[in-house]
Amino acid sequence: MAKSPAPAPNDTPVDSTALGSGKGRATPSRAEQEAARKRPLVPDTKEAKARARAELAAQREKARIGMAAGEERYLPVRDRGPQRRFARDFVDAGWHLGEGVMPFMVLVIVATLIPVQFFQYWSFVALWIFILFVIGDMIITSIRVKRAAKEKFGESRLEKGLGWYAAMRTVQMRFMRLPKAQVKRGQYPA
């Protein structure tokens, strides 16, 4: 028994008052009624995929902007909480040697391109001395942040790893930090 092709599903609601009691048209067969109710399990429309992709892109953009602005709900777990915000603000308020590591390394690379061994050797020596000063600055900043956080939040409530978090933020260039700096230089948190 050959089946006739199923008519396309109609998504528009049927108004029973407009149709009357079925007079004036033939009663649909059972196969036609079942075919009208059938819908594909997985909608396979390009526009649905494009719409979902656009919504996902909008959500990601909103989350990226929220994270850059420091909104708590968009931050990763490692950046959440009042103590982490305090440490970020403390680091962002000061000047740190670590911000200059990348530019200094570029200068060293340029110096190694000069075919004079004197410049190459002393540029590497200067880089290692600079890195030692950066490590010292990281240690001092870590101690200062932990001390200030103990005074503000109490010693018993101090989060583990707060000093390391602050020290790692010092080696990032200010304009590349995420979340973005929320305070100006010299504007230390109270």
Image (cartoon, rainbow, N blue to C red):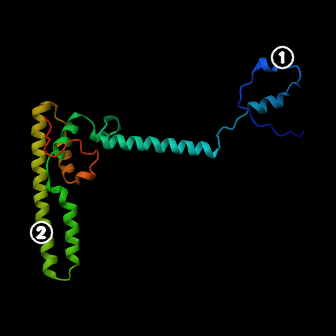
Depth-wise, is mark 2 or mark 1 nearer the camera? Answer: 1
- Report how many numbered discs are placed on residues in the image: 2
**Height in image: 110 above or below 51?**
below
Q: Mark 1 sits on what residue?
A: 21
At horizontal 46% and vertical 42% (from top left) the residue drawn is: 58
Task: Name which residue type carries label 2.
Answer: Ala
Quarter of the image where the N terminus is located: top right
Task: Name which residue type carries label 1.
Answer: Ser
17 vs 54, left or right, is: right
At horizontal 11% and vertical 53% (from top left) the residue drawn is: 137
Q: Mark 2 sits on what residue?
A: 126
139 vs 25, left or right, is: left
Residue 83 is situated, as x and y percent measured from the top left of the image, at 20, 36
Of 187 and 46, nearer the camera is: 187
**Height in image: 170 above or below 188?**
below
**Height in image: 60 above or below 19?**
below
Residue 6 is situated, as x and y percent measured from the top left of the image, at 80, 37
Decide which of tag 2 and tag 1 comes sooner along the chain.
1
At horizontal 58% and vertical 44% (from top left) the residue drawn is: 49
